[in-house]
Image (tube, grey):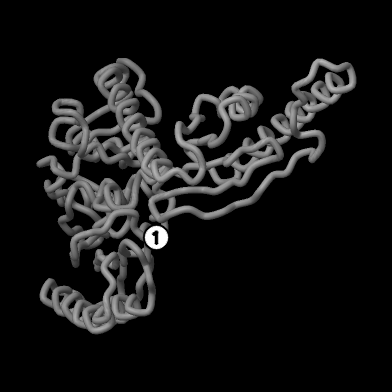
Amino acid sequence: MDLAFLTPLCDRPGPWASVYVDTSRHSESTTEERSVEAFAVQRALASAGADEATGRAVRSAVDELQHTREPIGRALFAAHGEVVLDLALSTPPSARAHWAPVPRTTPLLDLAGEDPLCLVAYIDRKGADLEVRSARGAADTSSVTGKPWPAHRAASADWSERHLRLDAEHTWEHNAAELASTLANCQAETRADLLVLVGDARECAAVESRLPKQLREHTMRARHGAGSPLLDAELERARAECVAYRAERDLERFAAERGRDDAATAGVPALVDAARQHRVAELLVDTAGPDTHREVWVGDEPDQLAMRRTDALALGAGEPAQARADDALMRCAAANGASALSVTAAAPGAAPAGGLGALLRWTQPRE
């Protein structure tokens, strides 16, 4: 999960209100229920020590959700009377309100992270319709139309009909090449993680063979055609498998590289050092791990991160505060261009011991 979207939370001091709202349920009483929930969130934040201005800002933002048909959920982050970030989620959350020195962002790894984009091409002999799918549904992007004539092959061996058959073959080749080029451009623009070809096996094969090699490695052909009630389930399985493959690949790399030239590390003290030195490339988080709850000392700046209060003071933190290790590491990782991955669903023994680990950017020289 690219953490760049968390940048607005990194350049201002806390404390922070972090609120997760389930908007997946809609009924005739939704408006009243949302108002009640907004008041409950404000009251919970006040009980936790939040200032009145921030509580009002969050209450207003939650109350406004009664006017939206948001299908899943929202995450709101506010400080000093302002909602700084309002995010759409890909998984319904349980209602939660947090007040802490740093934003409570770790739940996003399971609620908004690893939502692979799937570029779907519905192919026929004349072109294709394209759409992009995510956890939030499908969105049409464009259509591609190839040469219109001749599109069908002749069955006879007559010379003139054979000529038409060859023209049809050339048309297919032209259309397949044009479509492959368009798909490659569309994938680059949308940054889709997976390309799925839907249609006749021969036509899909013709397009796939003309895709760039790197894109072919992330391409699959659907077993079910457009309009099949089984296609949606097949696409969702493909997206889930994409997430599982990515996690498995990174965990295998973590297991192979940990302890070798400092390419990977685990444990809160080692991660704090690596994050402060901007060496974390990807943070691995098992949200059920015990280390996620460990407390570290933080200042207003993301790099003001330490295991001891005196060390935080030495880093320039004026009034160090204690914060959860996972959220403090997430803030530091986001500020320094790192990514993060939830490994909560990893096989037993595959996730970092304690629940926190990292793949590192560069290695330290041997002594």
What amino acid is at disc 1?
Asp
Which quadrant would the C terminus be assigned to in this image? top left
Would you name the residue on which mark 1 appears? 11
Kindly indicate the quadrant of the structure image that contains residue 355. top left
What residue do we see at 14% from left, 74% from top?
A: 44
On the question of residue 168 being in view, the answer is yes
User: Which one is in front, 355 or 145?
Assistant: 145
Quarter of the image for the N terminus: give it: top left
Q: Residue at x 19, y 65 (%)?
A: 95
Q: Secondary structure at mark 1?
A: loop
- On the rendered structure, is 236 left or right of 227? left
Farthest-out residue, right: 160
x, y percentage for residue 10? Answer: 37, 57
CA neighbours of label 1 inside 10 A, class few (<14), some (14 to 19), many (20+): few
- Position of residue 345 measured from the top left corner of the image (x, y, whole percent): 21, 37
Above or below: residue 303 compared with residue 282: below
Residue 28 point in image, percent of width and height: 27, 80
Q: Residue at x 88, y 16 (%)?
A: 159
* In this view, 67 is above or below 175: below
